[in-house]
Image (cartoon, rainbow, N blue to C red):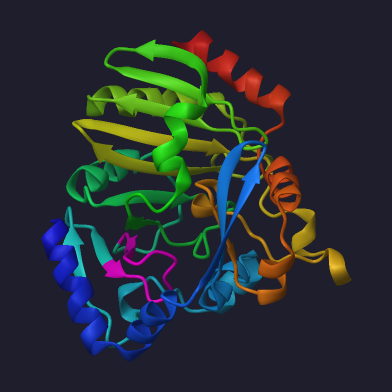
Amino acid sequence: MNQTIHNLLTEQLASWEMARNNYAALSGVQVKELNVNGIPYKVQFNPARIVSSGAKVDAKSIKERKCFLCPANLPAEQRGVPFEGHYNILVNPFPIFPRHLTIPETAHVDQRIALRFGDMLDLAQQLTDYTIFYNGPKCGASAPDHAHFQAGNKGFMPIEQDWRKQVAGKVADYGQATLWYLNDSPRTTLVIESADRKTALKLFDIVYHSLDIQPGEDEPMMNVLAMYEAGKWIVFIFPRAKHRPACYTAEGDANLLSSPASVDLGGVFITPVEKDFIKITAEDIAQILSEVCLSPADFQKIRQRIKEQI
């Protein structure tokens, strides 16, 4: 499957001018590194991502626009590779990664993870060159009305290499799986490590049902990363408290267009506006994370709930 996707990317960049230009522009994106409470983060200045970071995801805006992930509305140049009969693996034309995929469901159904987590594990196992990610409907998904995953080449996000050094403790052992939590405050991170698909599914289900669902919502707020290596799945779950930080809508100098999603929580903050890239500090990232992630007390409560269910 990795080779099939490599061929797709090569073909699309040859035939699709917009995608080719945006991938070429990646070589010139500016990156800076920041240390947030001892945890390494990168900041990427990527103007093309304004499409996602600035996306209007309120019900009215979504109703008034055509769904850009539905097969009928894809650009004429876009080609895909089918997956498991009901997904389409596409090249993302607005990349963060040198190889960036969007993987929408072929049917127009809402973005939800509960019944699709197994699909995410299967994607990770098939696409071993990639890390698969899921953004909840109010956690950075720019199409909360259409179920989809994304994928980026493995090793791009700092957390992928660094997480073992950040383990704070074990929440529980569960069959062939272990649930860890990281010492990476103000981010709140749970990690499932499992050699068995069924066990990973069950453990994720326990985590899912231990999280609070906010009034009027259908699922707990979260971002999820999944990768498969050395015969095991590694799944990062970032429970959320809030969609966007206060700086997103602040006026004047306090404004900073940051709408954190999986990649940001994985350690690469995306800034589509140059002034934000220049001014953003480790303190800003810590403040943003403290607003969108769970409080330490709530995170501890969740871990206790999980233990009680195992």
Residue 112 x/y as whole percent:
45, 48
Which quarter of the rendered picture does the N terminus lie within? bottom left
Quick check: can you spot residue 119?
A: yes
Give 295 or 145, whichever is nearer the viewer: 295
Q: Is residue 78 magenta?
A: no
Give the extent of the magenta segment.
90-105
Q: Residue shown at 74%/65% (left/top)?
A: 279
Give 306 or 17, whichever is nearer the viewer: 17
Q: Residue shown at 18%/80% (left/top)?
A: 11
Give 29 or 57, whichever is nearer the viewer: 29
Q: Is residue 83 above or below residue 158?
A: below
- In-image side of 294 versus 192 (left or right): right
Furthest toward the right, the residue is 252
- In-image side of 23 versus 78 (left or right): right
Q: Residue shown at 64%/25% (left/top)?
A: 299
Residue 172 x/y as whole percent:
44, 12
Q: Quadrant of residue 156?
A: bottom left
Q: Is residue 97 magenta?
A: yes
